[in-house]
Image (cartoon, grey):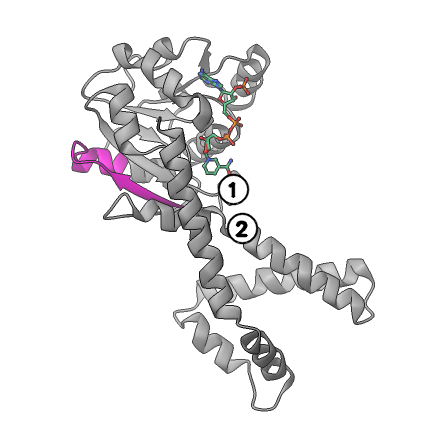
Amino acid sequence: MSHPRIAFIGAGNMATSLIGGLLAQGVPATHIRASDPGAEQRAKVAHEYGIELFESNAEAVINADVVVLATKPQVLKGVCQTLAPSLQSSQLIVSIAAGITCASLSAWLGDVALVRCMPNTPALLRQGVSGLYANARVNSMQRQLAEQLLSAVGLALWLEEEQQIDAVTAVSGSGPAYFFLLIEAMTAAGEKLGLPRDTAAQLTLHTALGAARMATESDVEAAELRRRVTSPNGTTEAAIKTFQAGGFEALVQQALDAAARRSAELAEQLGQ
Ligand SMILES: NC(=O)c1ccc[n+]([C@@H]2O[C@H](COP(=O)([O-])OP(=O)(O)OC[C@H]3O[C@@H](n4cnc5c(N)ncnc54)[C@H](OP(=O)(O)O)[C@@H]3O)[C@@H](O)[C@H]2O)c1
């Protein structure tokens, strides 16, 4: 497959991570364009990535195979309505805007081939994970293009139903913050047990990193890994029993239910 031509609408944090990832995959800089209203931002991105930047969104999408909508969700309606007359039916539209549904995008853009994605913040380090949903207009070549795009910043997983984006938001979209919360709590607890704050923080962070690598690099499920490090009557068992007595699993379920509900509510509000 020859390299696709990709246009980014909005050249902020997420777009520049994707651009950096695409260049690292070998997509030539001449195949990537972006538009952004900020003159300084345009100059910075052009300098850093060697791609062409435009003030006009309509100019950026000319001859693109893929148009990536990478503005904040709050401005996307206006962006889409202005852009719609400049799009061609052969172009794939990829939206990374949180909470904007395919129905809203189609209402603003017309009947287009559309992939809606939910990446997460570690995409900024190319360590992200994204859920992708394609509407019925997307062909198999375009699915590959969307997957190539999101794979540039981490793992890309297809979803069967658009509604599952709310669950993706609850698990991985908001997920980094849950781990940050656990890191905060473990660091504070380590300090109360008598460690210097910095030592408690380093111990916690490297334990998180090591555990995440063990779990991702092993074929064994997390529950089994946990059992393997939990000796009967040992220290780990004492801690795990305390977590479970406090209703840890039920609390996690409630937290993710709340995030998924909020994701659906925000989609409703932002789509108007
Ligand atoms: N960052 C994340 O971790 C993350 C995770 C999941 C999903 N997302 C989604 O990714 C999208 C982008 O997020 P971000 O963090 O990259 O935001 P960002 O850094 O603010 O980037 C958005 C860029 O779009 C520009 N822009 C504003 N109005 C525009 C217009 N009319 N036409 C073209 N460009 C315009 C902004 O310029 P100004 O700054 O001058 O307004 C800014 O440079 C959001 O929809 C967000 O929901 C982000």
The residue lying at 56 percent from left, 14 percent from top is: 43
The residue wearing badge 1 is 121
Q: Position of residue 155 (x, y in %)?
A: 39, 48
**Quadrant in which the N terminus appears:** top left
Above or below, 216 against 230 in this view is above
Q: Position of residue 265 (x, y in %)?
A: 40, 40
* Contact between labelled residues 1 and 2, with CB atoms less than 8 Å apart: yes
Q: Is residue 142 magenta?
A: yes
The residue wearing badge 2 is 176
Instruction: Specify whether tag 1 is near ligand 1 (CB below 8 Å).
Output: yes
First to last magenta residue range = 130-145
Indicate the amino acid at tag 2: Pro
Q: Is 113 or 107 nearer to us in this picture?
A: 107
Q: Which mark is residue 54?
A: none
Residue 3 appears in view: no
Is 30 placed left or right of 1 in the picture? Answer: right
Residue 67 appears in view: yes
Give the secondary structure at mark 1: helix
